Amino acid sequence: MEKVGVWVADDRFDLTALNVAFAGLPVVSASVELVNSWSGDLEELAADLLERFADDVSWCRVANDVHSVTEGSAEVRLTPRPDDPGWHAELFHAEGWKSQQGARIPAECRWQYARYADRRHEARESCLEVADLRAAAAKDGAAGVDNLVRHQQVQLAEWYAALDEFISSVHTAESIPEWAVLVAKDELMDWHRTREYLTSAVVEYHRGDVGPRPDTVFGNLCFRFSKAELELAPSPAH
């Protein structure tokens, strides 16, 4: 068993010694995040890549990338290396293509969703809580609180813009496809919950306890995008 602790500047860890290949090209590197997800165990990582991308195992092409296809949330993808012939392995931060969410997306539209998922991942860190604001205040005073709130606002705006781009990219001349409506509504629930955490944390920090806070706010909430409007209606169960 070969385990390593890794930190590299360009987020690429050399895998050439593992002799893992796909479609005649070697997997020459992996992201530090992927290697660390295996606790630095390169032999286990190599075995997992061989299993995910074997000829008789389910995988799919998404634009120029190759994705593993599972029911979970630990997808791995191979992306072409721009500087030499070979693949770069990394985590894909989205539900598996066989999951309830992933299975909704037509194969020909997976690349649009993958682009959205990448933007969402970059703009989504965590749900802000009042303890985070108090920690920022203790470290950097009022300016630290202001900077943290502004950072969260920028992330929420980027996340919303990414969802807007996704909706526009799959919008037909007539309307947004039903599968895209379902995907977008799931994403909006998550986005709205994150925004609710931010606003509640700010209110609690400045005004005290705000009372119980739901995971998701139910109600007729209308979100307006460039080419569509989506309403989050209460579930019949509620």
Image (cartoon, rainbow, N blue to C red):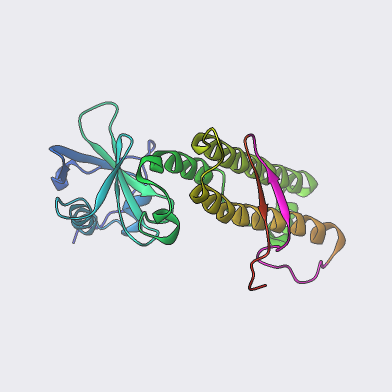
- Residue at 18%, 41% (x, y): give it: 16
**With 57 as the anchor, is 131 left or right in this view?**
right
Judge left or right: residue 136 versus residue 117.
Answer: right
Count of all numbered marks drawn on residues in the image: 0
The quadrant in which residue 212 appears is bottom right
* Percent of width and height locating residue 76: 32, 50
Residue under the point 73% across and 68% down? 213
Q: Position of residue 46 (x, y in %)?
A: 20, 53
Q: In front: 112, or 197? A: 112
In the image, residue 153 lies at what x, y percent? 69, 44
Q: Quadrant of the C terminus?
A: bottom right
Residue 219 in magenta stretch:
yes
Observer-nearest residue: 187 or 123?
187
Judged by its main secondary structure, the magenta piece is loop
The N terminus: image quadrant: bottom left
Report the span colored magenta: 209-226
**113 in magenta:** no
Along the viewing direction, whichever of 44 and 122 lies nearer the viewer: 122
Residue 84, relative to residue 139: is it above or below? above
Residue at the far front: name it: 174
